[in-house]
Image (tube, helix red, strand yellow):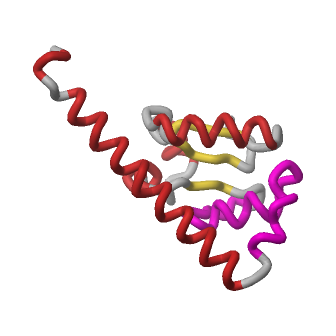
Amino acid sequence: MKYHLPLVLYDPECPLCVRFKQGLEYLDKSLNFVSVREDEVYTNFPELSRQDCISKVHLITVDKKILMGPEVVDYLVKTLPGVSKLSWLLDNEQGQKVKNYFYEKVEELRELTHKKQEECDQCPRRK
């Protein structure tokens, strides 16, 4: 297998995903990243769904457990040295609610960005 774990699947066509990837790379060098558009990742991890990976962030842990969505945020905050400084924020119910709210808003923004990109790609002025 050519992939080193932990592995984050991200969408390089999503500007927001690219920025989060850059931020995570800056915070912690132990993470590895692969495009959700790379066919080989689905061959190596057949339990992954391409559509699910495009719609929500996925992470494969060192022990090959697949996390998605807010679970990825929990994992990053609790386990990565560069991010774990913020783990105290999730120690209570209110912190979990804030994290979930933040994640939902990021997902909405990602979806809007994707729709806007599709509209731009279909614009007759671009053709």
In the figure, residue 118 lies in which quadrant?
Answer: top left
Residue at position x 64%, y 61% in the image:
72
| Residue 30 to residue 65: above or below | above
Residue most extreme to the left: 124
Q: Position of residue 44 (x, y in %)?
A: 57, 46
Asked if 79 appears above or below 24 in the picture, the reply is: below
Magenta segment boundaries in residue numbering: 64-90
| 13 or 98, nearer to the observer | 98
Main secondary-structure element of the magenta-colored stretch:
helix
Instruction: Say which residue appears at 28% left-offset and 39% top-offset.
Output: 116
**Across the whole image, how many numbered discs are drawn on residues?**
0
Q: Quadrant of the C terminus?
A: top left
91 in magenta? no
Left or right of 37: which side holds 83?
right
Say left or right for 83 vs 36. right
Provide residue 19's location: percent of width, then percent of height: 59, 36
Q: Name the residue: 69% across, 39% down.
A: 23
Describe residue 127's horizontal placement relative to residue 79 as left or right. Answer: left
Query: Residue 113, can we see it?
Result: yes
Q: Is residue 36 left or right of residue 98?
A: left
Q: Nearer the viewer, residue 46 or 69?
A: 69
Membership of 67 in magenta stretch? yes
Name the foreground residue: 84 vs 95: 95
Residue 42, how many percent across, how many down?
A: 49, 46
Residue 114 position in % (x across, y down) = 34, 42
Q: Residue at x 63, y 39 (%)?
A: 21
